[in-house]
Amino acid sequence: MKNKVLNSLVIILLGGFAGVFFVQIFLPWLAGFSFFNQIDWIRRVQEGTTIINTTERVIIDQNSALEQAIDKAGKIMVELISQRTEKLVGKTKVPLAEPEILAQGPAIIVSSDGLILAAENLAPETAQKFSVVLNNNRQVAEVKKRDKKSGLVLLKINESNLPVLPFFEGELKLGQILFLISIKSGNKLVDSGIVKQIQPNLVIGFTEAANSSPIFNLKNEIVGLNLVDNNNQPKIVLSAVLRELLK
């Protein structure tokens, strides 16, 4: 009786080892021959061992690409500060003891000679002084152009050899990964999402609407500018409109 049980266990173990050897070693080796590779179920065994490695590599590359893109895009980010330095008392302009901040938020460098692009409501016409914080230094800025229709403003600072990035000129695709960068009190904030809808309105899966925040793709191209109006309604102005303002 004991011998029968022992023989049965040996047969089961040998069968298990043979099965593992057959599936994990013999079949993949057999699939390497062109004749056997034409058999569908043998070919799937070989393909199954390759797909896992490919998927892992794609995920790692995608995360790395996003980190690198964010780091590079951050170099063209500045902060725009709009202030009022005087007020009207009757018909007389009276200087304020301390400048009053009317608006403050992110902007981007769009030319190496100091052109700065931002949401128009970050540079209100009631402001008398505009400043741009670049590399922790505050510089005086001058409004060069306003576009009420697009909600954009173009300013200029006295700088040269500034970093710039190209504008996106292709067509957005569903599922495309994009990210935006914002600045709040000198601190950069990042949000990423995918293109969820293109028509009739562009919808990107950002968790929050950050006014005047530029939107980039993984190639470090400027896709557009995220705007939020005074009624807290978001709107994305695409790169084609941004380029027109520079003409």
Image (cartoon, rainbow, N blue to C red):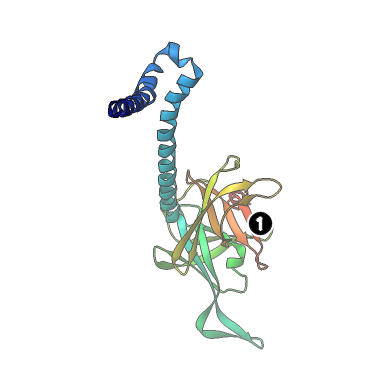
Label 1 crowding class (10 Å Cα cut-off): few <14, some 14-19, many 20+? some
- Is residue 163 visible to us here? no
Count of marks placed on residues:
1
Quarter of the figure with the N terminus: top left
Task: Tell me: 18 left or right of 123.
Answer: left
- The structure residue drawn at horizontal position 43% and vertical position 44%, both measured from the top left corner, is 65
What residue sits right under mark 1 in the picture? Answer: 150
Furthest-top residue in this view: 35
User: In the image, what residue type sits under mark 1?
Assistant: Ser
Decide: is 171 above or below 213: above
Furthest-bottom residue in this view: 90
Furthest-right residue in this view: 200
Decide: is 102 above or below 219: below
- The quarter of the displayed image where residue 45 is located: top left
| Of residues 60 and 176, the one drawn nearer to the viewer in this rendering | 60
- Is residue 187 visible to us here? yes
- The structure residue drawn at horizontal position 40% and vertical position 48%, both measured from the top left corner, is 68
- The quarter of the displayed image where residue 64 is located: top left
| Of residues 8 and 229, the one drawn nearer to the viewer in this rendering | 8
| Of residues 111 and 224, the one drawn nearer to the viewer in this rendering | 224
| Of residues 189 and 79, the one drawn nearer to the viewer in this rendering | 189
Residue 126, horizontal then vertical, whole percent: 62, 74
- The structure residue drawn at horizontal position 40% and vertical position 34%, both measured from the top left corner, is 53
- Element under disc 1: loop
Residue 107, horizontal then vertical, whole percent: 52, 60
Residue 30, horizontal then vertical, whole percent: 38, 17
Residue 62, horizontal then vertical, whole percent: 44, 43
- The structure residue drawn at horizontal position 40% and vertical position 67%, both measured from the top left corner, is 137
